[in-house]
Image (cartoon, rainbow, N blue to C red):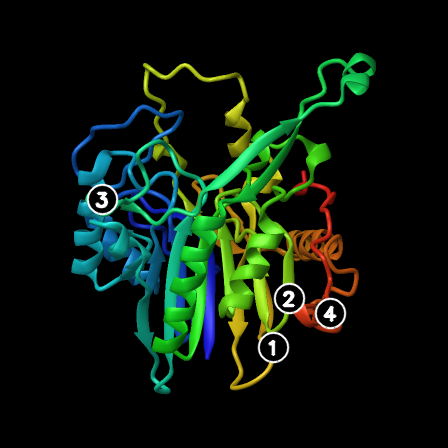
Amino acid sequence: MKIVLVGDTVLAREPAARPDRPALAGDVVIANLEAPLVDTDHPTEKEMTLRLPTWTAQPLRDLGLDVVSLATNHALDHGPEGLLSTLAALDGAGIRHAGGGSTLAEADAATVVGTTSGERLAVLSFSSTLPPGANATATRPGVAPLRVDQSFALDGTLLHEQPGTPPFVRSAAQEADVRRVEQRVRAARTEADRVVVCLHWGVPFAYLPPNQGPLAQYQQDLGRRLVDAGADVVAGTHPHCLHPVERWNDGLILYSLGNFLFHTGEVQQPDTFFGLPYRASRLFEGTPWFDSAVFEVDLPAAGAPGLRITPITLDAAGEPHLADPQAARRIRALVEESSRELDPSVRVDGDGFVHFGAPKGAATQLSPTPVDAPRCAS
């Protein structure tokens, strides 16, 4: 089975027809839908909101998307009505979806897709990035949550010597949510031959102090636990740039797929919002936002999956095209160098194939290693 995964997708108009647009060819193509499809404009109170007209569901299908993940921090930018509108628009276009629903049970459920070879793939979607009220409950529409506890560590001596240093953020996924999600993964494994977990997590580079590395502290342990529960692939989104890849046991953790197609003109900032000066506008500037990749995962009948990345760059309009040779080398190097902070054996060859050393996993009794890799390339 060949799975193609791409990152954050915001399509607001018909994309330009260009010969170097990356082809999405696989048994199942999965993308992260980063915005609700809704024709009414009722933004919620948050730093940035997104909205796409419902007619854009069909162009998404025309791109080749089979499944989209919905559990994101933007899914309820226009309230529960916006999420329900999204579900209806996707159903009308024949796009499968996971991660959002009228209840928690619906949001948690896997969508199972059959392939032409007769194999079945289960796709689940969860979000660790949760604006207030975005998580589904037994009686409220929303997205499937995987919540994270946070605390802040301060060194008084260091603060006197280095005033202005930000505190270190300690984070761990809430155990009750992890166990719930592990159960959903195990259940999906009984329904399908392979399981992909889409996970909206991590920290966008504009908000991340460089000295805290590209990954939040909770991510590596959580990703490994989901693989151990039965996920063949954990596919991360939200940081809007490429992050490391890791093989754990016979599974893959793709910490961030970056952006795929992003029409940034749809970003709105409500007049009533008063936020801290994090300079979020830096998200849309420089290399990290525009350098990305298409991830192709080959899942053999037995053994570890294979991974190939096809470098892409987004143009000024936010649309993807195959990277030129210089950009392709830069993108492959970024993935290799950041991944080697987790596993020094990782290599990405000139064709984009990712080579791992001996599998790591529970049998090796390795404890999660702290991550202090450079953040996205600049």
Q: Where in the figure is residue 187, as x and y percent of width and height? A: 37, 70
**Rendered-image quadrant of the C terminus:** top right
Residue sitting at x 52%, y 43%:
240
Is residue 40 or residue 236 the one in the foreground?
236
- The answer, for residue 260, to whether it is visible in the render is no
Q: Secondary structure at mark 2?
A: strand
Q: Sequence order check: which comes first, mark 1 or mark 4?
A: 1
Distance from disc 4 to disc 2, alpha carbons, whole Å, reads 13 Å
Distance from disc 1 to disc 2, alpha carbons, whole Å, reads 8 Å
Distance from disc 4 to disc 3, alpha carbons, whole Å, reads 41 Å
The residue wearing badge 3 is 141
The residue wearing badge 2 is 247
Q: Hey, what amino acid is under mark 2?
A: Arg
The residue wearing badge 1 is 304
Q: Sequence order check: which comes first, mark 4 or mark 3?
A: 3
Furthest residue in direction front, as rendered: 176
